[in-house]
Amino acid sequence: MKRTHLPLNGLRVLDAAARHLSFTRAADELAVTPAAVGQQIRALEDMLGVVLFRRTPKGLELTPETEGGLDALRAGFLQFEEAVRAMQAGQSSSALTIAAPRDITAKWLQPRLAAYAASQPDLTFQLIAADDALDFTEANLDLALRLADGPAEHEGVKIGDPTYVTVEAATGGPDLRIDWPGCPTDDRPAIIRVADGGLAIEAAANGFGRARVPQLLAQADLDAGRVRQVGDPSPTLLAYWLIAPLPQWRQKKVKALVEALTA
């Protein structure tokens, strides 16, 4: 019999009915009706081609066929439980693997992870530099931080407001454009082109000109006085999102980290 065709629900009902020698008590245990138990047993009998119970004046009795298979069945259920516990063990793992762009990792994520780690001394982190979407399973990721217009097919929560700001050196700088791959389009030529928004902020702080970057990315440097804001923030469709597929999102360690990062 192919494993994909194993009648697991029926076998679970059989185990309960055999322990209680009663469809009614088995139904109570399984939170179903006695009729549903009887239907599952009949379907299992049809599939296996054997009679599983005999009705007698004293109640139900197991047939030899049922008695012959019960020990192996119950051992199998114990192995299923062991398998489930082994798979759930990852939820209690002390390691978290997170993918994020280098710039937001340095300027926003790492300081918060350090603060979180101080309260979780057994926790360890692996940070993967990733500007584009990654396969969570292939990369063995728990969580990702992305600049995007939404979580796409994953679960997610938005970090901060979807706004961009223009920054220049704290003492002022020339009205020259600093370009980077995520920069809003501008027809003016750029004085310098850099690899990401974090380097654009550094170029602005060093006096090259003005960089237009996500406000969340620039906030620490604005607060520290390394750069100053020029003009008002402007809304955008892009924001930073913490995202993960539903199985990872449900993990206790991921839930706790997301709660800490969004507090």
Image (cartoon, rainbow, N blue to C red):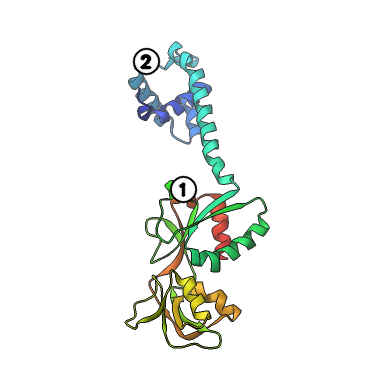
Residue 25 visible? The answer is: no
Task: Measuring from the top left, give residue 248's x and y in whole percent.
Answer: 48, 50
Task: Say which residue label 1 marks.
Answer: 247
Asked if residue 206 lies left or right of residue 137, the reply is right
Which corner quadrant holds the N terminus? top left
Task: Measuring from the top left, give residue 40's x and y in whole percent.
Answer: 39, 27
**Residue 258 position (above or below residue 1):** below
The residue drawn where x is 53% and y is 84% is 169
Instruction: Give neighbour class at mark 1: few <14, some 14-19, many 20+ (Cα, 10 Å).
Output: few
How many marks are shown on the rendered structure? 2
Task: Measuring from the top left, give residue 60's x and y in whole percent.
Answer: 47, 17
Instruction: Give neighbour class at mark 2: few <14, some 14-19, many 20+ (Cα, 10 Å).
Output: some
**Residue 12 position (above or below residue 217):** above
Towards the viewer: 163 or 130: 130
Indicate the amino acid at tag 1: Pro
The residue drawn where x is 46% and y is 83% is 209
Task: Say which residue label 2 marks.
Answer: 50
Q: Please name which of the two marks, 1 or 2, marks the residue nearer to the observer.
A: 1
* Residue 13, quarter of picture: top left
* Residue 49, quarter of picture: top left
Indicate the amino acid at tag 2: Val
Towards the viewer: 84 or 173: 173
Q: Earlier in the sequence, mark 1 or mark 2?
A: 2
